[in-house]
Every structure is written in C-alpha cells, then in structure tokens.
Amino acid sequence: MSEYEQTLQDVATELGKYAKIKALVDAGHYEGDALTFYAHVVAIVKGEGDV
C-alpha cells in the first residue's frame, strides 16, 4: 500500500470515528451519565470494539 493510500485509509478511519461521536451528540440524549458518555467517546476514539 502506498503512502497516499495509507493516508486515505487513515482519514477514512478518523472520519468514521467522528461520525459515530457526532451521531451520539445529535441524538440529543444519552442513556447514562456523563462519565458513561465520556467512556463511550473514548472507546470510539481508541477504536475499541464496535461501539
């Protein structure tokens, strides 16, 4: 894989993480407290599991 292709893949991954976080925020509510929300966002950013 070329450096260009790797960069595109990295950007796509980061945009996917952003989209998941944005979906949580746009939902307007969250089942849980602020700490649970923060933990969910951290898991998304770290790429842990399918959250």
Image (cartoon, rainbow, N blue to C red):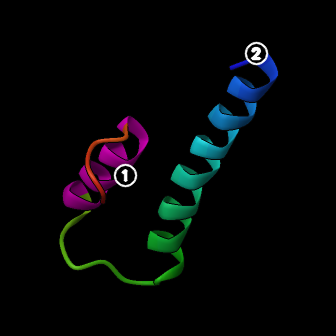
Residue depicted at 68% across the width and 20% down the height = 1
Residue depicted at 37% across the width and 41% down the height = 47
Q: Is residue 2 left or right of residue 34?
A: right
Q: Which of the pair 1/28 is nearer the observer?
A: 1
Q: Quadrant of the C terminus?
A: bottom left
Inspect the image, locate mark 2, and give the three-letter code of the amino acid beneath it.
Answer: Glu
Inspect the image, locate mark 1, and give the three-letter code of the amino acid beneath it.
Answer: Val
Q: Which residue is mark 1?
A: 41
* Crowding near the residue tagged with mark 1, few <14, some 14–19, many ≥20 C-alpha atoms within 10 Å: some
Magenta-colored stretch includes residue 41: yes
Q: Is residue 24 left or right of residue 38?
A: right
Magenta span: 35-46
Quick check: 34 above or below 31?
A: above
Quick check: 15 above or below 19?
A: above
* Crowding near the residue tagged with mark 2, few <14, some 14–19, many ≥20 C-alpha atoms within 10 Å: few
Residue 3: x %, y % from top left: 76, 15
Furthest-top residue in this view: 3
Residue 22: x %, y % from top left: 55, 66
Residue depicted at 63% across the width and 32% down the height = 10
Q: Which of the pair 10/36 is nearer the observer?
A: 10
The residue mark sitting in front, 1 or 2, is 2
Give whichever of discs 1 and 2 has the lower sequence position: 2
Residue depicted at 51% across the width and 72% down the height = 23
Furthest-bottom residue in this view: 28
Q: Which residue is mark 2?
A: 3
